[in-house]
Image (cartoon, coloured by chain):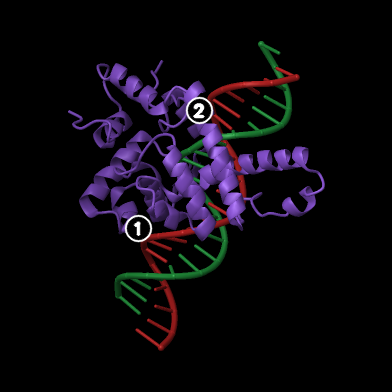
Chain colours: A purple, B green, C red
DNA sequence: AAGCGCGTCAACCGCAATTAG
DNA sequence: GCTAATTGCGGTTGACGCGCT
C-alpha cells in the first residue's frame, strides 16, 4: 500500500491525497479528449515532472509548443493552467494570512472581479485561488451578515438585503460593506488563533518528519521553493 | 454504519485580447 | 490591415473529504 504522497496543497488541515486516492479519482475522471487524444482531468506526478522540465527548458510562454514537444497529451492551455496555478515556483502554498484576506476584501471593493489584477497585488497567490477564496469565504460571510441583519432589525432588512455581496459576481458597492467584512474577518482571526493549529507549522512538521523516507516530486518541490526552507538539499 | 449536504479546490469551458504570419 | 493561432481571464463544474444526523 502506498504511503501518502502529499496534501494537494498544504492548505487545509489534514486533508491528504494519497496515491491510491489519486488513482481512484483518475480512473473515474480522467478522460481522453475527443480531439487528438488529449487528456483531461487531474495531473499525475509524472506529468507535472515533465511539464516542469520543459518549462525550465523553454520558458513559460509558448504553451502550445511545450504541449506538443513534451509529449504530454495535454493542450497548451491546460499546461499553462497547471503551471500558473500549481507548479510555479513562486507560489505560496498555505492558508491565506489575515493581511492577505484584508487585501482581497479591499481590492475587490475597488476593482470587482478582476481576479488576476488582485492576484498581482498578492505575491504567490493565483487568480484562481483568490477567486475560490472569495466565493467560499465571502459568500459565507455575506450569509452570516444577512442573518445578523435579520435578527437585529427586521424593518431595515428590506433595503439592506439588496446590497450586492451575496454572489461572487457582484462587487461590494459601498464602504459600509467593506468595513463590515473586515470586521468579520477580524472576529474570525480571533477564533482561528484560538482553535486552529497553524497550517504552515503542520505542513512543516509533516515534511520534516518525512524527510528521511524518500521524497516525492511534489514534496521536493515544496521544499525547494517554499520560503520556509532556505536550501532543499 | 450509512446517507446526505456542504465546503473546498483543481481543472475545464467559452470568450476576449493579444500575437504571429 | 487581415486572419488564424495562441494566451489570458473569469465563470463554472465536479470530485472528494468531512461533519452532521
Q: Which of A99 and A65 lies nearest the eye of the viewer?
A: A99
| Residue A139, image x, y percentages | 62, 43
Is residue A16 visible from the viewing direction of this image?
yes
Which element is circle 1 on? helix
The residue where tag 1 is placed is A64
Residue A88 as seen in the image, left or right of residue A135? left
| Residue C14, image x, y percentages | 59, 40
Between tags 1 and 2, which lies in front? 2
CA neighbours of label 1 inside 10 A, class few (<14), some (14 to 19), many (20+): some
Q: CA distance from mark 1 to mark 2?
A: 43 Å
Q: Considering only vertical position in the picture, is A89 above or below A9?
A: below
Residue A32 as seen in the image, left or right of residue A79? right
* Residue at the image point whose x is 32% and y is 32% from the top: A218
Q: Considering only vertical position in the picture, is A220 above or below A79?
A: above
Quarter of the picture containing the C terminus of chain A is top left
Quarter of the picture containing the N terminus of chain A is top left
| Residue C12, image x, y percentages | 61, 51
Which element is circle 2 on? helix
**Chain ID for label 1?**
A
Amino acid at each position: 500500500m502506498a504511503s501518502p504522497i502529499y496534501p494537494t496543497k498544504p492548505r487545509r488541515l489534514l486533508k491528504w491525497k494519497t496515491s491510491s486516492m489519486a488513482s481512484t479519482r483518475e480512473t473515474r475522471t480522467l478522460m481522453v479528449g475527443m480531439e487528438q487524444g488529449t487528456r483531461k482531468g487531474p495531473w499525475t506526478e509524472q506529468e507535472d515532472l515533465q511539464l516542469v522540465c520543459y518549462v525550465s527548458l523553454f520558458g513559460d510562454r509558448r504553451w502550445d509548443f511545450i504541449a506538443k514537444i513534451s509529449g504530454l497529451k495535454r493542450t497548451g492551455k491546460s499546461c499553462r493552467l497547471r503551471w500558473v496555478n500549481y507548479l510555479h515556483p513562486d507560489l505560496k502554498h498555505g492558508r491565506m494570512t489575515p493581511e492577505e484576506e484584508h487585501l482581497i476584501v479591499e481590492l475587490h471593493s475597488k476593482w470587482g472581479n478582476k481576479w488576476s489584477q488582485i492576484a498581482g497585488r498578492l505575491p504567490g497567490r493565483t487568480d484562481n485561488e483568490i477567486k475560490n477564496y472569495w466565493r467560499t469565504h465571502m459568500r459565507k460571510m455575506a450569509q452570516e451578515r444577512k442573518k445578523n441583519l435579520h435578527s437585529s432589525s427586521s424593518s431595515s432588512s428590506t433595503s439592506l438585503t439588496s446590497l450586492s455581496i451575496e454572489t461572487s459576481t457582484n462587487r461590494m458597492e459601498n464602504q459600509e460593506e467593506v468595513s463590515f467584512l473586515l470586521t468579520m474577518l477580524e472576529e474570525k482571526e480571533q477564533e482561528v488563533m484560538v482553535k486552529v493549529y497553524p497550517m504552515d507549522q503542520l505542513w512543516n512538521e509533516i515534511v520534516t518528519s518525512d524527510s528521511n523516507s524518500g521524497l516525492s516530486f511534489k514534496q521536493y518541490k515544496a521544499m525547494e521553493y517554499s520560503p520556509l526552507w532556505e536550501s532543499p538539499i
